[in-house]
Image (spheres, coloured by chain):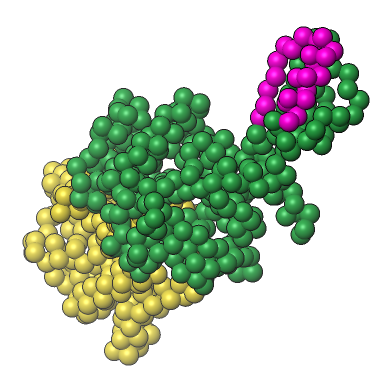
């Protein structure tokens, strides 16, 4: 993955007095799934739309496959696939017509196999306006990848989808990546990003607040591992007497310990239970999630502001 | 070429599939034709001489001034044009294909009127078919240009409808479609030269039925052609891919589309004076 296919250098974009993105820089490599994470208004869509050639940057340099997305839009159009946040489609176009229509402009044969894969094959003659939100999102994705682009931009691809559709879409995204497609997605869904993305950039107020692999991001925070224990009778430990433990709470029937040294903490806790002749019912050890790390970064930045 | 045919095919079907467009392209013009022809031929027996051109021009006005602008605004607002841009569809295709399909719809209705009017209302067929066809094409070209420009500059659907009505209603009242423009007061007759329908009727009077001319027929042809070309050019220039149309400057620039019509008024004033 050493070949950068998307390069963003000191990208700046404002709308009047509102600065949407400020001095953002990152690279995305061939075959990578890269996620932009951030709250509403953080600048994710502006960044994606500028890379797609829909918006002209005020400053900085954007390159997709070595080309300028605005100036070389005509050269890029068959190389990139885009699923917009609000996938605009003529209301009266049927699913079949949409596939024929957009594939004709990309000069490729219509991909009805994709419609079948995304369970839209029974909706071929249904007009766009009468499709459900999930069906519209799936159609937009099918149209975005029908011409087999090298780079795919997905703006909140699973928004409004049910669990089954979401799982199917994740499988499709992973399959595309395995075929060598580079995927850049924006999402609010932390679990989705943690599951799919190789690398993540967290955008806050138009700036990149943190970036790295999900593991790097979660390990660079406060880094507490959560150890939840259910014993019979309940543990009666008044203080953080175990090594590495810096916080203790009670949740339902569980004692929850936050530890900076989970191996030492777990060993000590088990020793304690054995010594007390208590019965261990359940033990769970959880790394901090991307969501927790995201909230930590967000709260820290808000406090600084 | 496949993409172009696909696009034309889809846009043409939309003109029938979309209920508003079906109404404005077919049901309203045909309903009005049947009703107004029955009434006006009873009131004015000579109306059968101009019935076909008047009803055909009315059809063009409803399709282009009321039917064409609003779908352009809705498509822009719902992000359809952004999708089109991403898929590499040019603004030339986006703007001119709806014009082409609108003209196709009006042609179908025009043919229905031409075929049925002599049978139903004893209407006189245009003796100079070529002249009438040319007048039809020039009127369709000029009105499509204006309709497209309205769709491109209108900030929202309501404004598009109002701007379309601002051309449609005066055309009905003083555009020479329902009663001859020589019946108008002289000053109003000059103002009517701002309207494409007035020039189209003038062309028919000059080339087809030999009626009253309030302006040189070739001059009217030039006004319609240059007005259409200017409006189409401005629509192309001012077209905005984005969901919202906030650029007020474009609305001022769009007024340039009226230049050929204003030139016609000035020419007429210089030649004949206000009275």
Q: Position of residue A292 (x, y in %)?
A: 68, 39
Q: Nearer the viewer, residue A84 or A175?
A: A175
Q: Is residue B196 left or right of residue A190?
A: left
Quadrant into which the C terminus of chain B falls:
bottom left
Please give the name of the residue rendered at 14% of the width and 66% of the height, measured from the top-left corner.
B134
Is residue A276 covered in magenta?
yes
Q: Position of residue A174 (x, y in %)?
A: 40, 37
Q: Is residue A250 left or right of residue B13?
A: right
**Is residue A27 visible to us here?**
yes
Report the number of numbered marks: 0
Q: Position of residue A179 (x, y in %)?
A: 31, 41
The chain that appears yellow in the image is: B
> Residue A62 falls in which quadrant of the image?
bottom left
Q: Nearer the viewer, residue B168 or A185?
A: A185
Q: Nearer the viewer, residue A198 or A75?
A: A198
> Residue A241 falls in which quadrant of the image?
top right
Please give the name of the residue rendered at 62% of the width and 40% of the height, measured from the top-left corner.
A290
> Residue A69 falls in which quadrant of the image?
bottom left
Please give the name of the residue rendered at 83% of the width and 14% of the height, measured from the top-left corner.
A275
The chain that appears green in the image is: A
- Residue range (magenta): A264-286
Query: Above or below — where is A194 with respect to B164?
Result: above
**Is residue B99 visible to us here?**
no
**Residue at the bottom extreme of this rendering:** B270
Q: Position of residue A48 (x, y in %)?
A: 47, 55
């Amino acid at each position: 993955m050493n070949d950068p296919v998307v390069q963003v250098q000191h990208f700046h974009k404002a709308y009047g007095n509102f600065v949407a993105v400020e001095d953002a820089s990152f690279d995305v490599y061939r075959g990578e799934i890269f996620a932009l994470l951030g709250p509403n208004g953080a600048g994710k869509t502006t960044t994606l739309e500028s890379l797609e050639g829909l918006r002209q940057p005020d400053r900085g340099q954007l390159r997709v496959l070595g080309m300028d997305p605005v100036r070389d839009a005509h050269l890029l159009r068959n190389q990139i696939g885009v699923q917009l946040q609000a996938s605009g489609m003529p209301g009266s176009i049927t699913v079949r017509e949409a596939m024929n229509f957009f594939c004709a402009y990309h000069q490729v044969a219509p991909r009805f196999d994709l419609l079948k894969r995304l369970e839209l094959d029974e909706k071929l003659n249904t007009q766009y306006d009468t499709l459900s939100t999930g069906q519209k999102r799936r159609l937009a994705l099918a149209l975005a990848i029908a011409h087999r682009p090298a780079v795919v931009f997905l703006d909140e691809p699973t928004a409004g989808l049910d669990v089954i559709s979401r799982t199917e879409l994740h499988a499709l995204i992973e399959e595309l990546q395995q075929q060598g497609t580079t995927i850049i997605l924006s999402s609010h869904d932390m679990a989705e990003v943690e599951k799919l993305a190789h690398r993540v950039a967290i955008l806050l107020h138009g700036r990149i607040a943190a970036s790295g692999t999900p593991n790097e991001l979660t390990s660079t925070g406060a880094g507490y591992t959560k150890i939840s224990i259910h014993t019979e009778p309940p543990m009666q430990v008044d203080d953080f007497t175990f090594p590495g433990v810096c916080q203790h709470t009670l949740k339902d029937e569980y004692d929850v310990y936050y530890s900076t040294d989970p191996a030492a903490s777990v060993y000590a806790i088990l020793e304690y239970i054995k010594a007390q002749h208590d019965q261990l019912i359940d033990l769970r050890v959880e790394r901090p999630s991307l969501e927790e790390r995201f909230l930590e970064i967000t709260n820290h930045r808000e406090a600084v502001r | 070429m496949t993409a172009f045919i696909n696009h034309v095919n889809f846009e043409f079907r939309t003109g029938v599939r979309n209920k508003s467009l079906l109404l404005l392209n077919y049901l309203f013009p045909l309903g009005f034709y049947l009703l107004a022809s029955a009434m006006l031929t009873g009131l004015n027996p000579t109306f059968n001489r101009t019935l076909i051109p008047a009803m055909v021009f009315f059809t063009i006005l409803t399709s282009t001034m009321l039917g064409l602008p609003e779908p352009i605004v809705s498509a822009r607002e719902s992000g359809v044009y952004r999708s089109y841009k991403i898929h590499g569809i040019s603004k030339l295709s986006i703007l001119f294909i709806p014009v082409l399909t609108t003209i196709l719809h009006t042609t179908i209705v025009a043919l229905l009127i031409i075929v049925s009017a002599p049978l139903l209302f004893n209407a006189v067929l245009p003796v100079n078919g070529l002249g009438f066809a040319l007048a039809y094409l020039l009127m369709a070209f000029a009105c499509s240009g204006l309709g497209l420009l309205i769709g491109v500059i209108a900030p929202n659907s309501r404004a598009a409808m109002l701007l379309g009505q601002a051309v449609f209603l005066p055309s009905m009242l003083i555009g020479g479609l329902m009663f001859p423009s020589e019946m108008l007061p002289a000053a109003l007759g000059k103002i009517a030269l701002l309207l494409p329908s007035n020039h189209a009727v003038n062309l028919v009077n000059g080339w087809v039925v030999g009626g009253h001319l309030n302006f040189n027929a070739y001059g009217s042809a030039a006004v319609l052609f240059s007005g259409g070309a200017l409006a189409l050019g401005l629509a192309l220039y001012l077209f905005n891919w984005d969901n919202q149309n906030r650029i007020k400057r474009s609305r001022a620039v769009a007024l340039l589309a009226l230049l050929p019509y204003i030139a016609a008024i000035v020419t007429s004033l210089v030649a004949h004076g206000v009275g």
